[in-house]
């Protein structure tokens, strides 16, 4: 087994891996951006190294910075978590090129399955059919239109190297193709570093059922169990459960067998998930995620298998600690993703900010996998997942009841969360009867009036989290070092010779944006943004005539693009922002006369 593992990630998944390593007696190395200097994963790790930068591209997607930390720390292995570089072939090869173990599948398997187009081909070679779609990357919106005309509308444009719903756009007609194609590529590039996309048929009422597999380097591959992840919005999962409800056992067995065949076709080992769409008694290969899934805890609770610990053992060259016949699934588990988002009647508006209180629920069968504690900041630059509430019950009704109890017991303030939406889903008879699909939340669930406003932090609470940088010279055993200290303002009134104090680097907000944040859009025609973020695109100019509901700009927050729309018709009088500008909640971006 390894003596030291570096976790090339942040948030709850970094915390999850750190805890598993500690239980196995493995030393842990954390990496962090400037914004994550005091993050929970940094506090828990045995060692922590700065990557620099604020955005993901400047830090967690900075290959050279991570490779430098690996060398300096002496880490023997790297766990990529999920997202960021977890499915990046070049990163995996760079790790193994250092003689360091990549805790995941071989780079060749990532290369085949990480590309959604080649993964479709691999599945077909294993005799597993996928949803009808293209097997080449899209080069223009015309190809989307041609596919839609041939197979029928709607169709889905998907990021070839992505996942989690990012870089995916549903196109309902030829008129929407050009904008959807451009938007999908833009979001894919920001989230995964590559903008290649493909198109496939969009099923009318499917369920999203995925199969957890794991294999070792000795040729053994098993399927551990399936998860139903159909409760989604914007193609991103809100609730996951295992086993899938109202799911015939013969389908379960066939899907498990298909997942193993897909894995074997690429020489796969370590943990992975083969995803399927299930409709009318048939299942179709969707994609394979060559990493640990966000929702892996529900599988752990029904099987008693620690998947992260198993990943570490497999990466160390050990055999799987169980066979297919050893796996027993007991009871029912449900996972709730607690995101920093206001359900806002179904709009799901990101809500970055400082968490002023976080007290997760307790009790029998309740687990909390969190990446934050009270006082921590949820940044606009990263994913909005605060943590995951996972419950177990002897059967599905018990698990649902326990989950509702735990959600109502959950105390969190400072940011809005998706907890009210989760309660609405769990209470609905469609969910209880497993009549929902991947489109159910957005098309059938009534979330009008369901919202969650963040509790406003007091001035003292806000100031308590602020720090400034002081560069100083220090001597240790007679050797001189230059170090940077991050301290509360006023805590170090005297700056040593050669030192300089300066605030943490942040991108300045555009002057004028936010100066009239209190203006109401309905009364004055001032269009404001509902959250902190970055302007990706401005869609109107001064003098343009706009209608109610027409998009005026695109705002990126927490790795997702959001259209900001006009709340009244009129003529654009003033545009206060440009692409690349940072804005805060309530800032005015466009004024309509």
Image (spheres, rainbow, N blue to C red):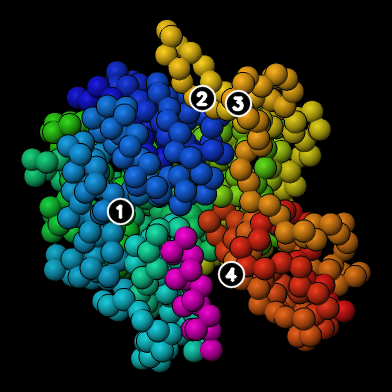
Residue underneath mark 4 = 443
Q: Is 176 colored magenta in this rendering?
A: yes
The location of residue 19, given as percent across then percent down, is 39, 26
Residue underneath mark 2 = 483
Q: Which mark is residue 88?
A: 1
Using the numbered discs, state the Cα–Cα distance from disc 1 to disc 4 in whole angstroms: 34 Å
Q: Contact (CB < 8 A) between labels 4 and 2?
A: no
Q: Residues within 10 Å of mark 2 (few under 14, many from 20)?
A: few
SS class of the residue under badge 1?
loop
User: Which mark is first along the chain, 4 or 1?
Assistant: 1
Q: Which mark is residue 176?
A: none
User: Which mark is first along the chain, 1 or 3?
Assistant: 1
Using the numbered discs, state the Cα–Cα distance from disc 3 to disc 1 in whole angstroms: 40 Å
State the residue in front, 207 or 61: 61
User: Which mark is first along the chain, 2 or 1?
Assistant: 1
Report the span colored magenta: 175-190
Q: Which mark is residue 499?
A: 3
Residue extending farthest left: 218
Is any atom of residue 244 visible in this view? yes
């Amino acid at each position: 087994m390894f003596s030291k593992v570096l976790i090339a990630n942040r948030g709850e998944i970094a915390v999850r891996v750190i805890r598993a390593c500690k239980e196995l007696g493995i030393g842990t190395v954390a990496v962090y951006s400037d914004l994550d200097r005091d993050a929970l994963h940094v506090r828990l790790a045995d060692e922590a190294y700065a990557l620099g930068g604020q955005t993901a591209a400047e830090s967690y997607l900075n290959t050279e910075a991570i490779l430098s930390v690996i060398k300096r720390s002496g880490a023997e292995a790297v766990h990529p978590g999920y997202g960021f570089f977890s499915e990046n072939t070049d990163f995996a090869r760079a790790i193994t090129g250092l003689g360091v173990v990549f805790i995941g599948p071989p780079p060749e398997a990532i290369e085949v399955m990480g590309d959604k187009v080649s993964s479709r081909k691999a599945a077909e070679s294993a005799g597993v059919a996928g949803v009808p779609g293209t097997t080449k990357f899209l080069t223009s919106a015309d190809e989307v239109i041609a596919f839609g005309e041939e197979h029928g509308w709607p169709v889905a444009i998907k990021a070839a190297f992505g996942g989690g719903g990012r870089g995916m756009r549903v196109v309902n007609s030829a008129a929407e193709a050009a904008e959807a194609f451009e938007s999908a590529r833009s979001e894919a590039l920001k989230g995964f570093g590559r903008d290649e996309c493909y198109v496939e048929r969009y099923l009318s009422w499917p369920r999203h059922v995925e199969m957890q597999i794991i294999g070792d380097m000795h040729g053994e591959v098993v399927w551990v169990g399936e998860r139903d992840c159909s409760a989604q919005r914007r193609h991103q999962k809100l609730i996951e459960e295992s086993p899938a409800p109202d799911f015939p056992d013969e389908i379960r067995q066939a899907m498990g067998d298909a997942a193993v065949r897909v894995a074997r076709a690429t020489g796969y080992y370590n943990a992975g998930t083969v995803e399927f769409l299930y409709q009318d008694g048939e299942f179709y290969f969707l994609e394979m995620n060559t990493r640990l899934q966000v929702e892996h805890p529900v599988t752990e609770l029904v099987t008693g298998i620690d998947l992260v610990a198993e990943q570490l053992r497999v990466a160390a060259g050990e055999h799987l600690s169980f066979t297919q016949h050893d796996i027993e699934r007991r009871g029912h588990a449900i996972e709730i993703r607690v995101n920093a988002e206001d359900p806002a009647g179904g709009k799901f508006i990101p809500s970055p900010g400082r968490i002023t209180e976080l007290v997760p629920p307790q009790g029998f069968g309740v687990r909390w996998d969190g990446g934050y504690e009270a006082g921590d900041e949820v940044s606009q630059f990263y994913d909005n997942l605060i943590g995951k509430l996972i419950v177990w019950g002897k059967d599905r009704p018990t698990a649902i009841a326990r989950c509702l109890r735990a959600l109502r017991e959950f105390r969190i303030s400072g940011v809005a969360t998706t907890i009210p939406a989760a309660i609405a889903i769990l209470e609905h008879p469609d969910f209880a009867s497993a009549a929902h699909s991947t489109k159910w939340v957005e098309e059938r669930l009534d979330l009008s009036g369901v919202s969650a406003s963040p509790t406003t932090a007091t001035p003292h609470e806000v100031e308590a989290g602020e720090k400034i940088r002081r560069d100083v010279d220090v001597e240790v055993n007679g050797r001189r070092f230059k170090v940077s200290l991050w301290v509360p303002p006023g805590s170090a009134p005297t700056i040593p010779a050669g030192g300089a104090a300066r605030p943490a680097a942040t991108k300045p907000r555009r002057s004028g944006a936010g100066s009239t944040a209190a203006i109401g859009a309905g009364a004055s025609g001032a269009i404001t943004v509902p959250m902190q973020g970055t302007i990706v695109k401005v869609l109107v100019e001064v003098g343009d005539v706009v209608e109610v509901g027409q998009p005026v700009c695109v705002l990126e927050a927490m790795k997702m693009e959001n259209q900001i729309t006009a709340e009244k018709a009129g003529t654009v009088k003033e545009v206060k922002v440009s692409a690349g500008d940072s804005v805060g909640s309530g800032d005015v971006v466009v004024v309509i006369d």
